[in-house]
Every structure is written in structure tokens, then in C-alpha cells.
Amino acid sequence: MTDYETDRTALLIVDPYNDFMSEGGKLFDAIRDTAESVNFFDNLRRIISAVRAAGISVLILPHHRAHEHAFVNWKHMTPFQKSGVPLKAFEVGTWGGEFNEEFGPRGGDVVVQEHWAQSGFANTDLDLQLRQRGIEKIILVGVIANSCIESTARFGMELGYHVTLVRDGAAAFSQEGMDVAFNINGPTYAHSILTTEDLLAQIHA
């Protein structure tokens, strides 16, 4: 059993934008099936509440928000980045590009610099923000399980952090994505893969 010490642990909430987390968001329907299958939103509410009550640090890891000239002259855009240009997901100045009221930042939380692709560490200040706070253990929740969460978690492991995944605290575009994230790839790098119930039993206010 892992000891999630208050002063050494942080909850990382990945991409809690309205476009993902709110009914009517541009990508809400894309994650709906997997979210409902694991009770994702209610689990996220429980996890965030428990973490805040325990005094554990909360960091928000936002995806790059769309704006008109974001990828001008880029040579090596990913397929996901290319598909996102016409969709304008998380567009600056729109409701979809704002944080969900429930799952976004509260006073005292840290909002990390936006990540351009998948990893919340690459080209952001996440590592600096964690190390300045003496954080050694990171718990990842949010979206997408086999994309931004997995990439961030892998990078964190490589940097020496203790990584915890929450199999019903994340959602993806498909059940296959969930299976890959938690049953195939996750065990190769994560130190703990827990359910919400498992996690809550190890967090004490």
C-alpha cells in the first residue's frame, strides 16, 4: 500500500475543459461511453474532494487552446493536431476553452503551462512546479487515458516520480483506449494502478 503523504503528493487533473467535461462540449460525446462505463465524473468528484480535504496539492494540466495562428509553419503536426484545427477544440475566448467549474482550478491550485501535444511535462513548467513543492508522487486523472494521461505519466516516471493511475478516474475515445492505457501499457511504467475506492482508502484528511 502506498503512503500518499500530504506534502509529497500531488493530484494532476489533465485537460478539464468544458469541451471535454461538460454536456455540449465539442468532445464530450466522444468520451461519453467510456466515462459512463466507469462512472468517471462522479469518481472525479470524489477524488478531488478527498484530495482537497487532505491538503494534497492540485495541479491543472491544460491542453493547448486553439487559436487562429497556432500551427502556422509547423512541419511535423500530429494527426490529432491536424484534426483539431478545423474542430477548434478548447478555442481561446469560447466556453469550450474555459475550465469546467467542477473539475477546473480552485484558489491555491497551480495551472501549469499548456502542453502542445500529449505530455504535460514536455515544454511546460510542470516539473519545476512539482519539484519546488517537494512533490515526489503524482496521481493522474482526467482525459485522455491513452494519450495525455499516459504520456504525462510515462514522462513523470522517467523523471523519477512515483506514478499512480486511476483506472476509473479517466476516460478515452474508446474502450480499446482504456484497455491499452490501464491493462497493457500502464503496468509497464506506473507504480500503482488503482480504482477510485482503492485510492480513497489510502487518502486521509
Image: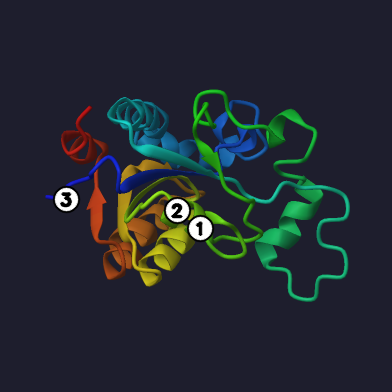
Q: Nearer the viewer, mark 1 or mark 3?
A: 1
Total label count? 3
The image shows residue 187, relative to residue 138, as above or below, that is below
Q: Nearer the viewer, mark 2 or mark 3?
A: 2
Q: Which residue is mark 1?
A: 128
| CB within 8 Å, label 1 to label 3 | no
User: Closest to the observer: 57 or 80?
Assistant: 57
Q: Amino acid at mark 2?
A: Gln
Mark 3: secondary structure: loop
Whole-percent x, y for residue 120 in the image: 53, 57
Estimate the spatial distance between the alpha carbons at disc 2 and disc 3, rounded to whole Å.
22 Å
| CB within 8 Å, label 1 to label 2 | yes
Which mark sits nearer the N-terminus, 2 or 3? 3
Residue under the point 59% across and 46% down: 62
Image quadrant where residue 12 sits: top left
| CB within 8 Å, label 2 to label 3 | no
Decide if residue 194 is on the left or right side of residue 102: left
- Give the quadrant of the C terminus: top left
Q: Which mark is residue 2?
A: 3
Which mark sits nearer the N-terminus, 1 or 3? 3
Image quadrant where residue 39 sits: top left
Q: Which residue is mark 2?
A: 132
Q: Spot the residue most to the left.
A: 1
Residue under the point 36% across and 52% down: 134
Image quadrant where residue 187 sits: bottom left
Estimate the spatial distance between the alpha carbons at disc 1 and disc 3, rounded to whole Å.
24 Å
Q: Pointer 2: residues within 10 angstroms few (<14), some, or many (20+)?
A: few
